[in-house]
Image (cartoon, rainbow, N blue to C red):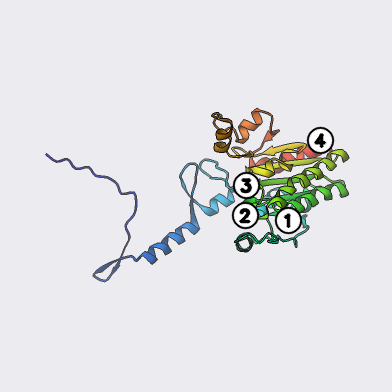
Amino acid sequence: MRFFSLRKKKYATLTVKDSDQTSTITEKEKNGITEEVSELWEKCPECGEIIIKKDIKRNLKKCPQCGYYYKMTANERLDLLIDEGSFEEKDANLEAKDFLEFEGYEEKIIKSKEKTNMNEGVLSGTGNISGIKVSIAIMDFNFLGGSMGSVVGEKITRALERGLEEKIPVIVVASSGGARMYEGIVSLMQMAKTSAAVEKLKQAGIPFISVPVNPTTGGVTASFAMLGDVIITEPNALIGFAGQRVIEETIKQKLPKGFQKSEFLLEHGMVDVIVKREEMKDTITKILSNIL
């Protein structure tokens, strides 16, 4: 006796009917359909639901089903935090140079500029948060993984120094894979430069609020991102220096699950508060109102 099981297909088969003839869709047409669908829909990496992209954007770049936090661009962060019409961009003309003649670096910069419509991986300037003037810098992970090269380090340093000059609070939103390897030791120098600028702010008593979001790693974590007077982050954000596998291989020990996530860092005193995205501006406003 033979048993047959009916299994539901995991994919859809598409055919096109022309009069009495049925023809299979070509590979090119299939790719076209796939591209069209990907422009309208996105699969949530957390819950697996297929979500309309417009719904994700309308929900502050969060999954409407499970609340998964998608990465925001620098301009989206700007709209989230800064009062409408109050932002004045600074240092927009600064652009990275391939002074080490690193193979492929110039092409990567060009592609990142086209992808983000930015000259570099950080947006900086002055603006108001609920009427309070601040100096702000916002990193964009879409620009070469938010890596910190000479220009990113310079723009963040200038944002910190601008706060010192104008005696206004400084906000830096970090999202980065770390130092930019294409610029070698020059990228590592930005760690010391930004940290020194933070120290000048502290000595002058100017508030510095650091907002490391998912992901913030490498040299950015090891410098200004964890030096804020107040460190604010979002739920389930990855914040750390080296990767878990690298650390475990180095110390020959198994690390706790989620040890680099924001909840673990809050529990161990590495960050001060975890804030939902929709509450970020109000939280920063309350902090600034209490310390100014």
**Of callouts 4 and 3, which one flags the residue occurring earlier in the amino acid sequence?**
3
- Rendered-image quadrant of the N terminus: top left
Q: Report which residue position mark 1 lands on.
A: 151
**Of callouts 2 and 4, which one flags the residue occurring earlier in the amino acid sequence?**
2
Q: Where on the picture, by quarter, is residue 2?
A: top left
Q: CA distance from mark 4 to mark 1?
A: 33 Å
Classify residue 2 as left or right of residue 110. Answer: left
Q: Where on the picture, by quarter, is residue 247?
A: top right
Local secondary structure at mark 4:
helix
Which three-letter amino acid code belongs to the residue tagged 1?
Val
**Of callouts 3 and 1, which one flags the residue occurring earlier in the amino acid sequence?**
1
Q: Where on the picture, by quarter, is residue 290?
A: top right
Image location of residue 16, percent across then percent down: 31, 66
Mark 3 surroundings within 10 Å by alpha-carbon count, few (fewer than 14), some (14 through 19), many (20 or more): many
Q: Nearer the viewer, residue 52 or 208?
A: 208
Which three-letter amino acid code belongs to the residue tagged 4?
Asn
Q: Report which residue position mark 2 lands on.
A: 144
Q: Report which residue position mark 3 lands on.
A: 177
Mark 2 in CB contact with mark 3 (< 8 angstroms):
no
Q: Report which residue position mark 4 lands on.
A: 290
Q: CA distance from mark 3 to mark 1?
A: 16 Å
Image location of residue 260, percent across then percent down: 60, 35
**Of callouts 2 and 1, which one flags the residue occurring earlier in the amino acid sequence?**
2
Which three-letter amino acid code belongs to the residue tagged 2?
Leu
